[in-house]
Each structure stands twice: as structure tokens, then as C-alpha cells.
Image (cartoon, rainbow, N blue to C red):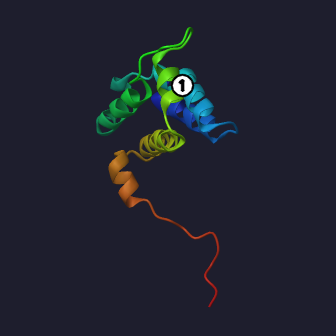
């Protein structure tokens, strides 16, 4: 896996698998996101990526064999973990569409699964 797009795709696919959200975040971070170089991303996405990276590693490891990402994710609530996963998917989508994550989120449309009955 070479490009940032491919790494974000892998992270997004990891987040879509079964398992607890925290387990999926650890896998996505360690297998894909921790190796992304900010300079490999479009300029519009770098700030959001930097913020997401900090959200993954804000806690100090306290347990043997634990790194900052595992410590941070372990201490997160499930709601925080859900929001972090959504941020990763939003960045992947923005990279795929060539727009900034904030602009992409504002332009996103909700499509109904079923047609309204007349």
C-alpha cells in the first residue's frame, strides 16, 4: 500500500468490519493511518488529518506493551470512538472526491432508501 488514498481506504475497510469500534480503530490506526505522511495529502485535508492524528495519540501509555494510540482508544467512550471513526471515513471520502472534509460534509446528501408512498 503506497498512497494516502490506499491507506485511508484500508482504514475505512477496517472500520467497516465486525468487532468493537475500539478494536477496529486500533487496527485502522496501526495498520494504515500511523504511516501516512501529512505531506502526501492534499493541502485542504492536512489540518483535519493532523487533528485526527492527535485524537488517536493524546494519552500516555500506562500499561505494559501499550502505545499512545492503544491508551487513547482504551480511554475513549464509545461515542468518542464513533466520532473518530466517522472522521476517518470523512477524510477518505474527501480524498476520493478531491474536496476538503468540511466542504464535503456540508455538501453530502441524505438519500432515502425507499420512495415515499403517495
Name the residue beneath numbered marker 1. 32
Residue 27 in the figure: left or right of residue 45: right
Quadrant position of the C terminus in the picture: bottom right
Name the residue furthest right.
18
Residue at the location (61% across, 82% down)?
116
Is residue 43 toward the left or the right of residue 90 in the image? left
The picture places residue 25, in percent across and down from the top left corner, at 56, 32
Q: Is residue 80 left or right of residue 107?
A: right
**Closest to the observer, 84 or 92:** 84
- Judging depth in this view, the residue of 75 and 5 nearest the camera is 75
Q: Residue at x 37, y 46 (%)?
A: 101
Residue 37 visible somewhere in the drawing: yes
Which residue: 50% across, 65% down?
110
User: In the displayed structure, would residue 75 be above or below residue 79?
Assistant: above
Label 1 residue SS: loop
**Neighbourhood count class around disc 1 (C-alpha, 10 Å): few under 14, some 14–19, many 20 upward:** many
The one nearer the camera, 101 or 75, is: 75
Residue 8, horizontal then vertical, whole percent: 51, 33
Q: Is residue 15 above or below residue 111?
A: above
Furthest residue to the top?
64
Q: In the image as oriented, which residue stretches furthest toward the bottom?
A: 118
The picture places residue 64, in percent across and down from the top left corner, at 56, 8
Q: State the image coordinates of residue 43 (x, y, percent, origin top left).
A: 29, 35
Q: How many marks?
A: 1
Does the image show residue 99?
no
Residue 21, image quadrant: top right
Q: Is residue 95 left or right of residue 9?
A: left
Q: Is residue 107 above or below residue 17?
A: below
* Relative vertical location of residue 113 with respect to residue 31 in this rendering, above or below: below
Q: Residue at x 34, y 33 (%)?
A: 51
Which quadrant of the rendered structure holds the N terminus?
top right
Amino acid at each position: 500500500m503506497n498512497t494516502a488514498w490506499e491507506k485511508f481506504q484500508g482504514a475505512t475497510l477496517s472500520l467497516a468490519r465486525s468487532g468493537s469500534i475500539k478494536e477496529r480503530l486500533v487496527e485502522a490506526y496501526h495498520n494504515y493511518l500511523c504511516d501516512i505522511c501529512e505531506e502526501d495529502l492534499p493541502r485542504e485535508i492536512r489540518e483535519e488529518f493532523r487533528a485526527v492524528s492527535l485524537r488517536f495519540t493524546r494519552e500516555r501509555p500506562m500499561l505494559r506493551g501499550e502505545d499512545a494510540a492503544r491508551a487513547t482508544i482504551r480511554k475513549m467512550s464509545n461515542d468518542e470512538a464513533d466520532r473518530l471513526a466517522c472522521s476517518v471515513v470523512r477524510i477518505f471520502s474527501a480524498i476520493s472526491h478531491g474536496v476538503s472534509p468540511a466542504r464535503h460534509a456540508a455538501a453530502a446528501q441524505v438519500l432515502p432508501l425507499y420512495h415515499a408512498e403517495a
